[in-house]
Amino acid sequence: MKIAIAKFGLVGLLFASATVFGGNPDRSGGAGATQLNINPYARSAGYGGANTASVRGIESFNLNIAGLAYTDKTDIAFSRMSFLQGSGVSVNNFGLAQAIGENGDGGVIGLGFSSWDFGSIPITTYDNPDGTLPTFSPQVLNIGASYAKKFSNSITGGFLLRLISEGLSDVRAQGVAFDFGVQYQTALNAKNEKKKIKKEDFRLGISMRNIGPDMTFGGPGLSFRAINSQTGADRKAYFAADKFNLPTLVNIGLGYDMRLDQTNDTYFHRLTGSFNFNYNAFQSNVYGFGAEYAYKESAMLRVAYNVSGDKQLFSKNQENPEYLNPVYGLWAGATFQMPISKSGTSMAIDYGYAPTRIFNGMHTIGIRLTVGGKKG
């Protein structure tokens, strides 16, 4: 029964994702809360979003929440991103995933916190343009709570609720967003009777992200005092703040594991190829291609390349076509993971690089602790 429900959900999500296709690149820049599309997790940040189908554990928070279901026991991650290297903006991120019941039979719950640090910005006014006044710093905080579950050995699904808060001390916008995701895996290669290994090597993943009501800014910072020069009437007036959409997007990804050598009970070299189609309702579409090499699931190197799918990109009459989508180019990352106890607990150091059109890219460094579970 659970398998039937999971398969029905997979088909339903496929149809649901198809109904939202048909985005308009002319709407680029028309959404707010775009920080939701920045991945602060170091391991997947270097994969360019190409691993929608194969992302696992706490890294699933900002790509495909269905992968959270593969948490064996406890997964803890902390990362720090240098956003637009040279701009002085950074992102601090913390995530926790915990399996429920024996072998995660009750599913997996997760919590995530992401806070942006813009530093101290001088206040300038018409009368004081030189920045001699006190400083201010915008506050951007995202808090997510999620649940994911294995419906069978092949199908996992999950959802996430994210609270969004951004603004200044006297002007703020708050909202909520939902993510939904499904992953499917199966073995394309037949079982090798001599080596007695049958691994799921083909993966499909679909996620719908940032679905929620419009947000709007409000607060005393949008008010001003107006005095009628003739009557002397003192009134407090407010500027009207328009609503803005969330940056809704859909990811559809494929992944395939190639095991380069095998023994009777394990393998040492893995090469995974990945593909991802990203539909963003407020940007041009993006096609991502990625590959990850792993040695004993302890040392990993990954690389990805994203290209824009917008036809205008190839138009001779289009000036500066790279402005159509800021997500492009070559991404790269690395992981070094080692066991720290006989119970299966391991610690990993991750690094991810993302290209940007201006400044010097985005660099993310993270530490991940997997308690009592399998590596990877």
Image (spheres, grey):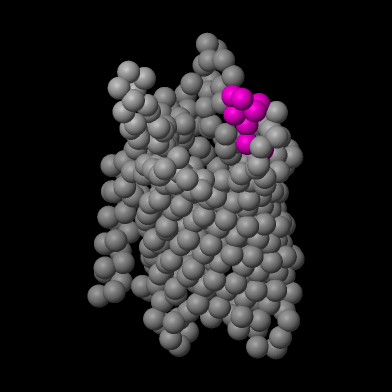
Residue 346 % position (x, y): 68, 77
Q: Quadrant of residue 240?
A: top left
Residue 173 % position (x, y): 42, 46
Q: Who is closer to the viewer here, 279 or 168?
A: 168
Asked if the stretch drawn in magenta spans residue 12, the answer is no
At horizontal 65% and vertical 28% (from top left) the residue drawn is: 128
Asked if the stretch drawn in magenta spans residue 124, the answer is yes
At horizontal 69% and vertical 33% (from top left) the residue drawn is: 131
Q: Who is closer to the viewer here, 13 or 204?
A: 13
At horizontal 36% and vertical 19% (from top left) the residue drawn is: 229
Q: Quadrant of residue 221?
A: top left
In the picture, the quarter occupied by the N terminus is bottom left
Q: How many marks?
A: 0
Q: Is residue 249 visible?
A: no
In the picture, the quarter occupied by the C terminus is bottom right
Q: Who is closer to the viewer here, 136 or 182?
A: 136
Q: Who is closer to the viewer here, 226 or 86?
A: 226
63 left or right of 219?
right
Q: Main secondary structure of the magenta part?
A: loop
Residue 5 % position (x, y): 26, 68
Residue 239 % position (x, y): 37, 32
At horizontal 29% and vertical 61% (from top left) the residue drawn is: 9
Q: Which residues are magenta?
A: 122-129
